[in-house]
Amino acid sequence: MNQRINAVKESINHWNRMIAWVRTQKKHKRVNEYEMKAAINEDWYSNSCEICRIYHGNEELCPLNIVQRGGCGKFSSAWKKVDNSETWGKWLTASRKMIRVLKKALRNEKNIKRIDALFKEYSDGEN
């Protein structure tokens, strides 16, 4: 299995771990990424994301960039909705959308082929 697919699978696992932790929190409680980081050593920022580790600096190749037609920083992205959540209940709702986007990236062969073509174009440009 290639690195890109492994990264998306790891990201899905990462989000599932965060969701499991958030389910232990009161839904009306204010979101606090530092609490999450202290409890499970993960959060929803790029340092905890396997996809971001691989595609940092090459965001145009990122599977989520292609599936969402723009990166995670785009206002309408699933990640941005998580990041803008004020309570754990809203975070949990938004994170389910993030999981759906990740699963779409994993199964969408058209996007995988497009990523491969972009990667080849990028790699050929370096030579």
Image (spheres, rainbow, N blue to C red):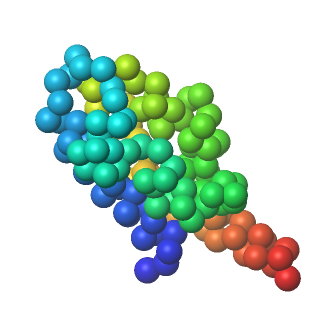
For the point 29% across and 40% down, the residue is 36
Residue 94 falls in which quadrant of the image?
A: top left
Residue at 49% across / 78% down in the picture?
2
Q: Quadrant of the C terminus?
A: bottom right
Q: Position of residue 103 (x, y in %)?
A: 39, 53
Specify whether 57 is left or right of 84. right
Residue at image position (40%, 57%) is 11
Between 43 and 89, the residue placed more toward the observer is 43
Q: Position of residue 91 (x, y in %)?
A: 33, 29
- Which of 33 and 62 lies nearest the eye of the viewer? 33
Q: Position of residue 38 (x, y in %)?
A: 28, 44
Q: Is residue 2 above or below residue 115?
A: below
Name the residue at 69% across, 70% down: 119
Q: Can residue 106 be seen at all in this image of the molecule? A: no
Q: In the drawing, does residue 37 fall left or right of residue 53?
A: left
Q: Position of residue 83 (x, y in %)?
A: 46, 31
